[in-house]
Amino acid sequence: MPDTMHRIALARRPKGLPVPEDFAYESCEMPAPGEGEVLVAVTHLSLDPYMRGRMDDVKSYAPSVAIGGTMTGQGVGHVVASNAEGFAAGDLVTGITGWASHAVLPGTELRKLDPGTPPSAALGVLGMPGFTGWTGLREFADMKAGETLVVGAATGPVGSMVGQLARLAGLRTVAVAGGAEKCRLALETFGFDAAIDHRAHADASSLRAALAEVAPDGIDVYWENVGGKLLHAVLPLMNVHGRIPLCGTIAWYGGVEGDGTDHLPGLWRSILVKRLKVSGMIIFDHWDLYPQFLTEVGPKVAGGEIRYLEDIAEGLENAPAAFISMLQGGNVGKQVVAL
Ligand code: NDP
């Protein structure tokens, strides 16, 4: 057992898109587990868009990371030492380890994984993002066969789950993704009926014209991952009584489209005119459904009916660069860091 562990701390609060100087790679003393606790050696770390919000000092649905604190996040790893009932050295587990090589967590906050589970899948297709897609469709989309669904960030773990489940439910599915290669993956790997490259359209009206062509009957369900230009493009194309599960607004997380200031007033009236049902969702509220998700979707993933892509960066020290890249669309599939 080494004496030291490594972690990525928040060095300062970013302005807009994070830069490498906002993070610090540090070594510190290896912690020892207390009563009821487990020491985990992390093998895979999840990088998720929500982490950008945790870097800001604003009141939100979850606490922000303190300056000097370890960046938050879910990891998968092996138990090294356990003082908690039900956990033994060698067990494969997942929990909120943070961006760190090792973590001490109460046994009550860890979940054991089947030793056969691909660790990175537990963070993506069968983890929080895949579960988000399944839950949001089930709870908020009211999908009907023959309707049209549009989703942005369509090759990521949330968007690809949404698109595939909607297709299986008999909807026409339209992907919006960044670049020709991601559009090809949306069509060929994930089976979308059409794919639009948002980067090929300078403004919302050009993007809207492209969407109108591939959604000739209008849009019934817009799964909101993005905000920004895509939201402006989509809203006028929504059918009366359309549904918008509002999952994320990554275009406004300080990346390429800025910080979201003053975007909403022009959009508000469309919700009235079309009598749209917009449902903000945070996956925290729905963890009681997780076993049902695994029962329903696990076999579809194992059988290849639901497919997934992963983008695996190597080394904890490279997590900040992979994260910054993901916020700008540099990832192809679920962004994971292998330690
Ligand atoms: P992804 O792996 O899909 O990564 C983010 C993707 O967003 C990028 O690859 C890029 O894809 C796209 N993107 C970035 N900037 C823009 C932009 N300006 N316009 C259009 N697309 C952009 O992420 P996830 O699947 O993990 O998450 C998708 C969304 O779901 C995020 O908004 C996230 O915050 C949200 N989320 C919300 C949860 C909740 O509980 N509400 C839970 C989990 C996720 P491309 O290159 O194709 O443009």
Image: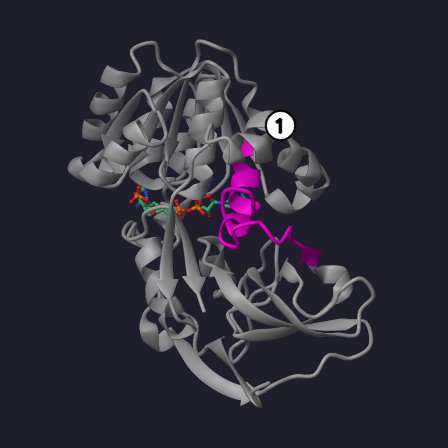
**Quadrant in which the N terminus appears:** bottom right
CB of mark 1 near ligand 1 (< 8 Å)? no
Q: Is residue 120 magenta?
A: yes
Residue 268 image-quadrant placement = top left
Q: Nearer the viewer, residue 44 or 56?
A: 44
Q: Secondary structure at mark 1?
A: helix
Q: What residue is rendered at 46% in x and 40% in y?
A: 158
Query: Residue 58 location, x and y as percent?
Result: 54, 62
Say what amino acid the circle numbered 1 marks: Glu
Q: Is residue 16 visible?
A: no
Q: Is residue 128 above or below residue 232?
A: below
Q: Is residue 80 above or below residue 250?
A: below
Residue 14 image-quadrant placement = bottom left
Q: Is residue 127 magenta?
A: yes
Query: Residue 269 location, x and y as percent?
Result: 43, 26
The residue beneath circle 1 is 139
Q: So how many labels did they put on this image?
A: 1
> In screen coordinates, is 258 left or right of 4?
left
Q: What residue is rendered at 58% in x and 75% in y?
A: 102
**Residues rendered magenta in the picture:** 111-134
Q: Nearer the viewer, residue 271 or 74?
A: 74
Q: Nearer the viewer, residue 118 or 239?
A: 118
Q: Residues within 10 Å of mark 1 (few under 14, many from 20)?
A: few
Q: Is residue 213 visible?
A: yes
Q: Nearer the viewer, residue 128 or 242?
A: 128
> In screen coordinates, is 115 left or right of 106?
left
> In screen coordinates, is 289 left or right of 315?
right
**Quadrant in which the C terminus appears:** bottom left
Q: What residue is rendered at 46% in x and 43% in y?
A: 248
Query: Residue 292 location, x and y as percent?
Result: 69, 33
Task: Give ligand 1's quarter of the image.
Answer: top left
Query: Residue 277 location, x and y as percent?
Result: 54, 23
